[in-house]
């Protein structure tokens, strides 16, 4: 390994562990403001559709699947980030339109994105439809309100090339609401990262989030696919069942750190309420996280 590459790796090592109080420049580039499809220029659609042509492989090694329900106001930013992904692997991108009533489909069409429709409402149905449509060896799950690093695809695939690994997942950082700083969000992430480490002892599948994980398509189908009887937690359920095929593995590289919208976190009304809710919930489960694994 040459000196330049060593320095690059060292920088990456430090970045992924950094107490991130500022949104990186590469993320801010995709955080453009728009309210609906009419706010996006023809140039935007032309540029994005041109860049996303690389994700139309007839024989993909990688499939990126994104469920979407009324994401007209968000998905353009996600597509913008995906258009700058750097990979030499043949890849397909598929968005599953789960009964959107806004102009999500029109936006996707103008971006030249391959879409399929899933009439059964719910994230589990949408993810299962994506699994059935995927042609790639590797299946990467993304979401419509997240921003992905340029090395995201390769980071997960390189992890999954280890055949002892059945499920690959990455970390995340939260995008603050307009006009807000990341100070409180960074504190929140620091505390939740502690919970993540505790869960890694014997319940690592709880760390797997739907917008940033992957597995081999064949394995996903072999364990029964996504559990459509569960309206929530389809991602963790998939990770748990994939343990039949191998181990769950965290991608520590900064290339697998996804930036995602904080709107779900703020559903409790404020970051403080969300923090208290998380502490209360995790506190009840703490003993289960730290107790030793049961021997077979």
Image (cartoon, helix red, strand yellow):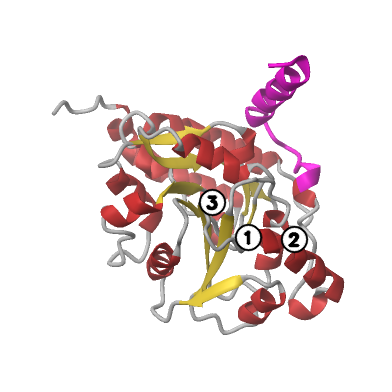
Residue 173 seen from this side: no
Mark 3 is surrounded, within 10 Å at the Cα level, by few (under 14), some (14 to 19) or many (20 or more) other residues, namely: some
Apparent side of residue 244 relative to residue 36 in the rendered image (left or right): left
**SS for dot 1:** helix
Residue 16 seen from this side: yes
Instruction: State which mark lies toward you, 1 or 3.
Output: 1
Residue 280, located in which quarter of the rendered image?
A: top left
Cα gap from disc 2 to disc 3, whole angstroms: 41 Å
Mark 1 is surrounded, within 10 Å at the Cα level, by few (under 14), some (14 to 19) or many (20 or more) other residues, namely: many
Labelled disc at residue 55: 1
Q: Nearer the viewer, residue 258 or 62?
A: 62
Query: Could you tell me which quadrant the N terminus lies in?
Result: top right
Residue under the image location 45 percent in, 60 percent down = 135
Apparent side of residue 200 relative to residue 257 in the rendered image (left or right): left
Q: Position of residue 253 (x, y in %)?
A: 59, 32
Q: Nearer the viewer, residue 222 or 31?
A: 222
Disc with the residue nearer the chain's start (2 vs 3)? 2
**SS for dot 2:** helix
Image position of 48 with respect to 203: above or below: below
Q: Residue furthest left?
A: 296
Which residues fall within the magenta stretch? 1-26
Labelled disc at residue 51: 2
Q: Nearer the viewer, residue 5 or 58?
A: 58
- Prevailing secondary structure of the magenta residues: helix
Q: Position of residue 221 (x, y in %)?
A: 31, 57
Disc with the residue nearer the chain's start (1 vs 3)? 1
Image position of 56 with respect to 101: above or below: above
Q: Position of residue 209 (x, y in %)?
A: 46, 49
Is residue 234 within the magenta segment?
no
Q: Position of residue 121 (x, y in %)?
A: 41, 77
Labelled disc at residue 192: none
């Amino acid at each position: 390994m040459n000196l330049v590459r060593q320095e690059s790796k060292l920088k990456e090592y430090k970045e992924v562990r950094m107490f991130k109080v500022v949104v990186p420049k590469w993320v801010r580039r995709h955080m453009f403001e728009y309210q609906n499809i009419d706010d996006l220029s023809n140039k935007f659609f032309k540029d994005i559709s041109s860049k996303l042509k690389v994700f139309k492989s007839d024989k993909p090694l990688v499939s990126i699947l994104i469920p979407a329900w009324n994401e007209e106001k968000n998905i353009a930013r996600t597509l913008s980030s995906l258009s700058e992904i750097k990979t030499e692997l043949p890849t397909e991108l598929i968005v599953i339109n789960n009964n959107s009533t806004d102009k999500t489909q029109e936006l996707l069409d103008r971006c030249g994105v391959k879409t399929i429709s899933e009439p059964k409402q719910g994230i589990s149905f949408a993810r299962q439809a994506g699994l059935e449509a995927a042609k790639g060896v590797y299946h990467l799950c993304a979401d419509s309100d997240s921003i992905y690093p340029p090395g995201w695809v390769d980071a997960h695939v390189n992890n999954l090339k280890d055949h002892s690994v059945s499920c690959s997942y990455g970390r995340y950082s939260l995008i603050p609401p307009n006009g807000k700083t990341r100070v409180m969000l960074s504190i929140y992430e620091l505390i939740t990262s502690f919970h993540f480490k505790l869960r890694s002892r014997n319940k690592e599948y709880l760390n797997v989030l739907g917008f940033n994980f992957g597995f081999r398509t064949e394995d996903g189908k072999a364990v029964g696919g996504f559990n459509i009887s569960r309206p929530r937690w389809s991602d963790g359920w998939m990770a748990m069942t994939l343990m039949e095929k191998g181990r769950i593995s965290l991608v520590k590289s900064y290339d697998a750190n996804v930036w995602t919208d904080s709107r779900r976190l703020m559903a409790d009304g404020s970051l403080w309420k969300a923090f208290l809710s998380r502490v209360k919930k995790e506190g009840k489960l703490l003993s289960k996280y730290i107790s030793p694994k049961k021997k077979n």
